[in-house]
Amino acid sequence: LACAARAGGVVSLRTSATSSAVRGAPTAERRADVPGVVVPRAAGDPAEAVYVVKEGRVHLMKFLEGGQASTTCVMAPGETFCCLPALDGKPYSVDAVAAVDSVVVRVPTSAFHELLRSNPSFLQQSLCFFCDRLRQVEDRSCMVYDSVERRLVQVLLTLSKKFGPTIPLPKHELAEKASTTVETTIRVLSQLKKQRVITSSRGSTTIAKPEHLQRLLGS
């Protein structure tokens, strides 16, 4: 489960269920963050709350020795993070950083536990959420044996489930998610662009022919 907390989940708690649950938590509060600011939780901090992205984009990041930073997951509006530490009481294992101007909803751990106890629907959604995150961990571990092209295609399709056809991530972040170099990512995306499978602009990529990407993934 600790690994599932950040391999790049593509399925969150349903927005309607999460939103209604948050509204039912009297101590929930909103917090706005600006790019580069740590959403009030960092690796090693005690797990005092669960967070839901209301607006913007939050990256869960691991800062490595030597100054390198690795994005383990990108959280889109409606997605929940920090659930596992809130459940087992262990400290947060990664930093949550606002990638753009963002608003998150903070649900104290005590309120989250009460929702799980008192709301069977919310509990069921949470279990499905954790199962989907674990599947993403398994899928990502298998990606290491794929070609770079297949890895990038998988990343694009996965992120499109979060953001829709236009993926608001720059090329260096796509490269990081696919475990490849920026140069290789630019080359592969340029090929897809020539085939009119995608279009791109500064800081974003739009999938024009998702069925073509699906065929590439299945080939």
Image (cartoon, grey):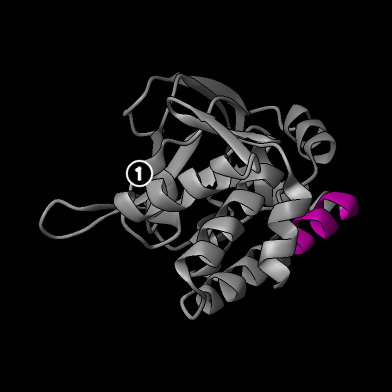
Task: Determine whether 93 is above or below 17 in the image.
Answer: below
Q: Is residue 197 above or below residue 72?
A: above
Give residue 176's quadrant in the image: bottom left
66 sits left or right of 115 in the view: left
- Residue 3 visible somewhere in the drawing: yes
Residue 62 is situated, as x and y percent measured from the top left of the image, at: 32, 55
Q: Quadrant of residue 207?
A: top right
In the rendered picture of this protein, how many numbered marks are placed on residues?
1
Depth check, front residue: 55 or 111: 55
Mark 1 lies on residue: 172
Tell whether position 123 is magenta.
yes
Q: Is 76 in front, or is 122?
A: 76
> Seen from this angle, which residue lies furthest left?
66
Amino acid type of the residue tagged 1 in the rendering:
His
Q: Which range is magenta?
A: 120-128
Q: Position of residue 166 (x, y in %)?
A: 63, 32
Using the image, determine if residue 141 lies above or below residue 133: below
Residue appearing at x 31%, y 56% in the figure: 181
Percent position (x, y) of residue 33?
42, 21
> Residue 19: percent from the left, percent from the top?
77, 32
Which residue shows up at 45% across the image and 59% down it? 178
